[in-house]
């Protein structure tokens, strides 16, 4: 039975930075399956997260709105259930929308339009991870130092591996079941959108020996040190560095830093293998030719660059993400597109792909024409990112066009980088007279797009509400919203 509407497979990694992938030109890290996906599709070289933090980025992607429009400021802030998502849009177009893996939703709605979640989530759905800008920053310090010093390198097994193995097993089972249903059902199957979301290569940086050993003897690149970057920094750098709790002793320990990177490389290759299994299954059951595939990540990973660990900042390793799209029968193949794009663009892109009119109130812009046209289009795009979560003390904003990146802290510092001439972001051009026109352009864009004072007020108010509710719910019954899927044993097999 043929299905007229194309299927959609969205594969999302967690905390994967584009620059450390073989598919993006890294000379060491092996990603053969993603390499092939690039050959059969389009690689976006300037894709960005709308927020360098898990939950806000994912909410923005689903809703097609900037995080300050949604109020999803951190990993413990409610994603409102009355906000339409691309899952709602696809279901209204008769798609079966299924998710296997992490979504990091907070609050009582753990679906947001998704018809079925095949696994539970990996992070809490409560308001427990909300920062507090009205209290001492020391309250929220995490132990990134411990993640490097004591919890990095080879592991026999990890909980993250347990989770991703389940995510993969459920995703593959879904695809195989589709084929069985095709032959056994009398009614026509709906096209599917399968969202497969892994937690790798998120820290802690631990992977099994077989993956680690692929990079055991490789030459690890030396990250830019915080001393080298100090002249281009603003207060956001030190806020995030303090929050991570990482000492100079760890940063200067070349053996520990090399182990961290080799483990991260192995974790990327692990995800690539999962991508290969998904693609092989599509091929085996003749689903590939009618399935549009997207691969991306929620944000990146600094991995010691500039003395920073994990994400929460706008430098390239943290804010720039992979985005690869493949649908050979309709889209370009082997194309590299340099147009600035963002996860917030997914909703309008999928709407246009399905022949739907794009809702006027979305913040994203469809990049479907980039997929279809032989040449890059929309080179004049500007994409935005925000960060108002743990570690920082003020709202923080980023704007990026085809060449420049501008960063602005509310009532604080500013940065302007020419990424063409300065890819390591070491020369802040804010006081460069030759860049005044560019500076004024970005400053105006940020002030028009964001009311930073109102955002600060809203962040603090929502933090206090969430803290109060979380405290109240700790008394009495242990009420939790964590999604627990029901195993459909009665309907899966013939009786």
Image: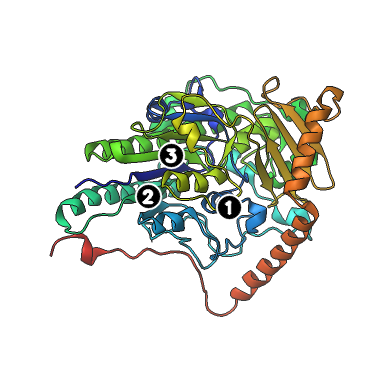
Residue highlighted by disc 2: 193
Is 215 displayed left or right of 191 in the figure? right
Res. 73 in view: no
Where residue 360 is drawn, which disc sits there? 1
> Which corner quadrant holds the C terminus?
bottom left
Q: Which of the two marks, 2 or 1, is nearer to us in this view? A: 1
Query: Badge 2, how many Cα within 10 Å: few under 14, some, many 20+?
Result: many
Residue highlighted by disc 3: 294
Residue 283: x percent and y percent? 26, 36
C-beta proximity under 8 Å, tags 3 and 2: no
Where residue 494 is drawn, which disc sits there? none
Residue 303: x percent and y percent? 60, 34
The span from disc 2 to disc 1 (Cα, nearest Å) is: 23 Å
Residue 365: x percent and y percent? 57, 43
Res. 224 in view: yes
Q: Which of the two marks, 3 or 1, is nearer to us in this view? A: 1
Whichever of labels 3 and 2 marks the residue nearer the N terminus, that label is 2
Residue 153 to residue 64: above or below: above
Which type of secondary structure does the marked residue at label 2 adopt? strand
Residue, x 43% and y 43% (percent of image)?
A: 353
Whichever of labels 2 and 1 marks the residue nearer the N terminus, that label is 2
The span from disc 3 to disc 1 (Cα, nearest Å) is: 24 Å
């Amino acid at each position: 039975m043929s299905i007229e509407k194309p299927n959609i497979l969205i594969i999302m990694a967690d905390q994967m930075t584009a620059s450390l992938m073989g598919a993006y030109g890294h000379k060491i890290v092996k990603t053969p399956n993603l390499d092939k996906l690039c050959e059969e599709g389009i690689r976006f070289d300037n894709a960005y997260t709308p927020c360098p933090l898990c939950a806000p980025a994912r909410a923005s992607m689903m809703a097609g709105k900037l995080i300050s429009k949604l109020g999803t400021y951190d990993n413990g802030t409610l994603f409102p259930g009355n906000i339409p998502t691309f899952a709602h849009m696809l279901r209204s177009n008769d798609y079966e929308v299924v998710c296997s893996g992490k979504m990091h939703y907070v609050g009582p709605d753990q679906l947001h339009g998704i018809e079925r979640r095949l696994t539970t989530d990996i992070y809490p759905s409560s308001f427990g991870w909300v920062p507090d800008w009205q209290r001492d920053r020391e309250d929220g310090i995490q132990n990134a130092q411990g993640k490097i010093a004591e919890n990095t390198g080879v592991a026999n097994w990890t909980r993250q591996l347990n989770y991703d193995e389940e995510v993969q097993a459920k995703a593959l089972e879904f695809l195989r079941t589709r084929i069985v249903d095709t032959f056994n059902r009398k009614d026509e199957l709906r096209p599917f959108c399968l969202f497969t979301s892994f937690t790798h290569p998120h820290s802690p940086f631990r992977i099994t020996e077989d993956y680690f050993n692929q990079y055991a003897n490789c030459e690890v690149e030396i990250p830019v040190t915080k001393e080298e970057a100090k002249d281009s920094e603003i207060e956001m750098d030190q806020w995030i560095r303090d929050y991570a709790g990482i000492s100079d002793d760890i940063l200067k320990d070349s053996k520990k830093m090399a182990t961290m990177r080799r483990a991260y490389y192995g974790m990327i290759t692990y995800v690539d293998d999962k991508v290969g299994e998904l693609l092989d299954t599509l091929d085996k059951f003749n689903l590939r030719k009618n399935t549009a595939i997207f691969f991306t990540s929620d944000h990146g990973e600094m991995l010691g660059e500039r003395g920073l660990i994990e994400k929460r900042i706008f430098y390239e390793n943290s804010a720039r993400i992979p985005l690869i799209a493949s649908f050979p029968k309709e889209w370009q193949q082997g194309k590299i597109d340099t147009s600035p794009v963002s996860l917030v663009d997914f909703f309008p892109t999928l709407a246009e792909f399905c022949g739907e009119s794009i809702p006027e109130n979305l913040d994203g812009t469809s990049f479907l024409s980039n997929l279809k046209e032989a040449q890059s289009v929309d080179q004049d795009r500007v994409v935005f990112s925000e960060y108002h979560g743990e570690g920082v003390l003020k709202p923080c904003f980023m704007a990026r066009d085809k060449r420049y990146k501008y960063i602005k802290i509310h009532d604080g510092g500013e940065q302007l980088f020419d990424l063409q001439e300065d890819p390591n972001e070491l020369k802040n051009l804010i006081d460069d007279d030759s860049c005044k026109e560019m500076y004024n352009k970005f400053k105006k864009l940020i002030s028009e797009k964001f009311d930073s004072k109102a955002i600060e007020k809203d962040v603090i108010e929502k933090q206090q509400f969430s803290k109060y509710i979380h405290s109240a719910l700790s008394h009495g019954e242990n009420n939790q919203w964590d999604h627990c899927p029901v195993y459909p044993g009665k309907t899966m097999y013939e009786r």
